[in-house]
Amino acid sequence: MSKKVVLAYSGGLDTSAIIPWLIENHGCDVIAVVGDVGQGEQELAGIEDKARRSGASACYVLDLKRTFVEDYVFPTLITGAVYEGRYLLGTAIARPLLAKAQVEIAQKVGATALAHGCTGKGNDQVRFESAFAALAPEMEVIAPWREWDMRSREDLIAYLDECNIPCSTSVEKIYSRDANLWHISHEGGDLEDPWQAPPDDVWMITTSPEQAPDTPEEVHLGFEQGRPRTIDGQTLPPEQLIAELNEIAGRHGVGRVDIVENRLVGMKSRGCYETPAGTVIMEALQSLAELVLDRETRRYRQQLGLKFADLVYDGCWFTPVREALSVCAEQIAQRLTGEVVVRLYKGSATCVRRRSEHSLYSADYATFGDDEVYDQSHAEGFIRLFSLPSRIANLKRKVAL
């Protein structure tokens, strides 16, 4: 009886080649697992049949969209996590969920090995295998990109041609893409030259800002404990809210990022990301945090977000430190309830209005007009105490002279 291997399957170039390669080189029974995290009907259409025609004995397609948004995206969102200032972690945050689903299927079918299509140069191999180690350390891990003699995507395309397995990737259009509800990433091809501007055919869900509508559009978001629940007054399931906001913001050219980032494995890579809904929600949530959090809490949330971004990027979701930081973030998010209006215009998303029952803003205190609550003469004593260290230091210098 051949061993069973469960493969994280996307139907793309890499995993399409992996199924026949595993059969040829490991002599195993391959079960494909597809996690639907919102990559779209075009990518999922006929994927079970394709997996079987590639040699898989079975293919499980799991609807994970709501779990993805509610249990992975939103918990990351409330921390304010942004990797290296710009990347909203669209690919990274999906990996622990996909790995978990893969492990669960492997345990269900009695498999002894797990396989993935991540390259030996990328971050995803660490993310998948760290999740495997936390959830199923007894299982063997097979990473074909670290074993086979194929070294390029052109090699894989040629191999698929030999196996008579169709794939949408071509030598002429060889971008490596990863799509889910939260974003689409684009790497490879012309993007490997940082001096070359992204070609127009890179972008898929955002309009060019130059071609976006000349009239701004405002979206009204309602938050409950840091999570967006309504859009323009309508309560929607989380996955539907993200999908609708992607469409609205995308047509205004919002959410494009062209970044040269530091990969976990040590090299720099250039990627183009489209995260229209995420960009709008992050702007709104940051603006809400400004309104309801005191200075020290807000600054600590910023520090927490930096650390959380690294943990997600590095594949450390199933770790005690990530769990501890999530508890802290949830406590801070208790006050992140309110409404925010974001104006979309030619690639920009800007908060223009915000309100909350937890607001710490008081017009009575902040006004430049006449007020009856703030005695300005009190500021003199505050300033004397605040500047006391500087005053003492100056006196010491004079004595020394």
Image (cartoon, helix red, strand yellow):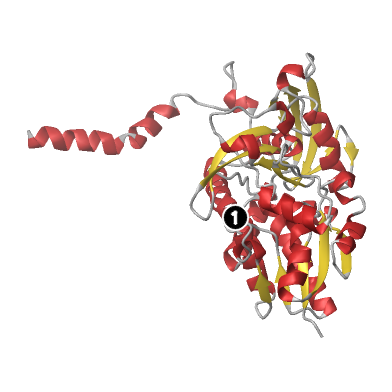
Q: Position of residue 247 (x, y in %)?
A: 84, 33
Query: Is residue 312 or residue 389 the one in the foreground?
Result: 312
Residue 351 seen from this side: no
Q: Residues within 10 Å of mark 1 (few under 14, many from 20)?
A: many
The residue wearing badge 1 is 123
Residue 141 seen from this side: yes
**If the image is split into quadrants, where does the C terminus sit?**
top left
- On screen, residue 47 above or below 232: below
- On screen, residue 365 above or below 279: above
Residue at 63% of width from left, 45% of height from top?
80
Q: Position of residue 357 (x, y in %)?
A: 74, 39
Report helix, strand or loop for mark 1: loop
Residue at 66% of width from left, 52% of height from top?
92
- On screen, residue 265 above or below 139: above
Q: Position of residue 270 (x, y in %)?
A: 58, 40
**If the image is split into quadrants, where does the N terminus sit?**
bottom right
Residue at the outermost top position: 214
Q: Position of residue 149 (x, y in %)?
A: 61, 61
Residue at 60% of width from left, 44% of height from top?
82
Query: Is residue 295 or residue 138 the one in the foreground?
Result: 138
Question: Could you say which quadrant of the image residue 83 lies in?
Answer: top right
- On screen, residue 87 above or below 382: below
Judged left or right of residue 18, residue 304 is left
Residue at 38% of width from left, 27% of height from top?
380
Query: Is residue 166 or residue 45 the one in the foreground?
Result: 166
Disc 1 marks which amino acid?
Asn
Residue at the outermost left position: 401
Say how many tags the image has.
1
